Image (spheres, rainbow, N blue to C red):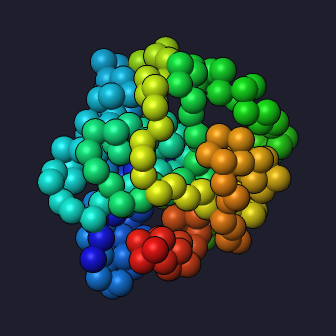
């Protein structure tokens, strides 16, 4: 059994994982969806990591999973405490000293041209997408003003799972991002950016497989 620390993206919440969590439980794992302090103007990157560390306490066999902007937090968690694996799901991989505002240019990201209605939830069931939009919160600016602090990448097995239908981070871009930032070939699955809502069972299967490695 593994403990899965499930980290959401920017301006979002642990609710994003509410369909994946029971699927992981069915497979014998303990999922812990974490709420980051995204609305706290005093919280920076280390405070985000501390929220995860406090949630998982001293549990063993920790697998840290980060969606989207959660990728800025997850490696910091692995620097704070031991972990068996670090998994980026449609994730943003930061570099030491990098500002969030510079990350987009530094990684060669290009705008797909979709508006927000088409960008995030295009493959999520309509009622679920409506609830997701209603739950969207404000993202405080404090961490965005801070250079990403980790000087040395944590010594933990790392994986990158891209979503082939992602309209925010295209498959072509994500493949390159994983190679350039992590030195590895990305794994792939069908689905858009909010894969945890669109394909929760398939995502849980992928996470379960990573835990078994």
Q: Position of residue 10 (x, y in %)?
A: 49, 39
Residue located 53% across and 19% down the image: 97
Q: Is residue 187 above or below residue 54?
A: below
Q: Is residue 16 above or below residue 147?
A: below
Q: Is residue 200 left or right of residue 163?
A: left
Residue nearer the viewer, 200 or 78 = 78
Residue located 19% across and 44% down the image: 54
**Is residue 27 visible to the viewer in this orientation of the structure?**
yes
Residue nearer the viewer, 64 or 23 = 64
**Is residue 129 visible to the viewer in this orientation of the structure?**
no
Q: Is residue 43 above or below residue 138?
A: above
Q: Quadrant of the N terminus?
A: bottom left
Residue located 69% across and 67% down the image: 188
Residue located 39% across and 55% down the image: 64
Q: Position of residue 85 (x, y in %)?
A: 42, 59
Q: Among all residues in the image, which is located at the extreme left? A: 58
Q: Is residue 81 above or below residue 161?
A: above
- Residue 112, quarter of the rendered image: top right
Q: Position of residue 152 (x, y in %)?
A: 46, 32
Q: Among all residues in the image, which is located at the extreme top? A: 145
Q: Is residue 126 left or right of residue 211?
A: right
Q: Tally the marks.
A: 0
Q: Position of residue 49 (x, y in %)?
A: 32, 37
Q: Is residue 78 left or right of residue 1?
A: right
Residue nearer the viewer, 14 or 74 = 74
């Amino acid at each position: 059994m593994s403990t899965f620390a499930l980290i959401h993206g920017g301006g979002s919440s642990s609710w994003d994982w509410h369909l994946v969590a029971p699927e992981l439980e069915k497979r014998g794992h303990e999922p812990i969806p974490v709420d980051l302090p995204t609305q706290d103007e005093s919280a920076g990157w280390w405070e985000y990591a501390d929220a995860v560390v406090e949630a998982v306490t001293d549990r063993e066999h920790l697998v840290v999973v980060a969606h989207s902007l959660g990728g800025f937090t997850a490696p910091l968690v692995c620097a704070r405490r031991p972990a068996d694996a670090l998994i980026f799901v449609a994730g943003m991989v930061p570099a030491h000293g990098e500002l969030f505002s510079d990350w987009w240019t530094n990684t060669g990201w290009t705008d797909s041209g979709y508006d927000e209605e088409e960008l995030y939830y295009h493959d999520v069931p309509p009622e679920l997408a409506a609830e997701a939009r209603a739950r969207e919160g404000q993202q405080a600016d404090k961490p965005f003003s801070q250079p990403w602090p980790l000087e040395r990448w944590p010594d933990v097995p790392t994986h990158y799972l891209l979503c082939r239908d992602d309209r925010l981070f295209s498959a072509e871009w994500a493949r390159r991002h994983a190679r350039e930032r992590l030195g590895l070939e990305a794994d792939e699955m069908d689905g858009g950016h909010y894969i945890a809502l669109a394909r929760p069972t398939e995502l849980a299967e992928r996470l379960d497989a990573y835990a078994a490695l």
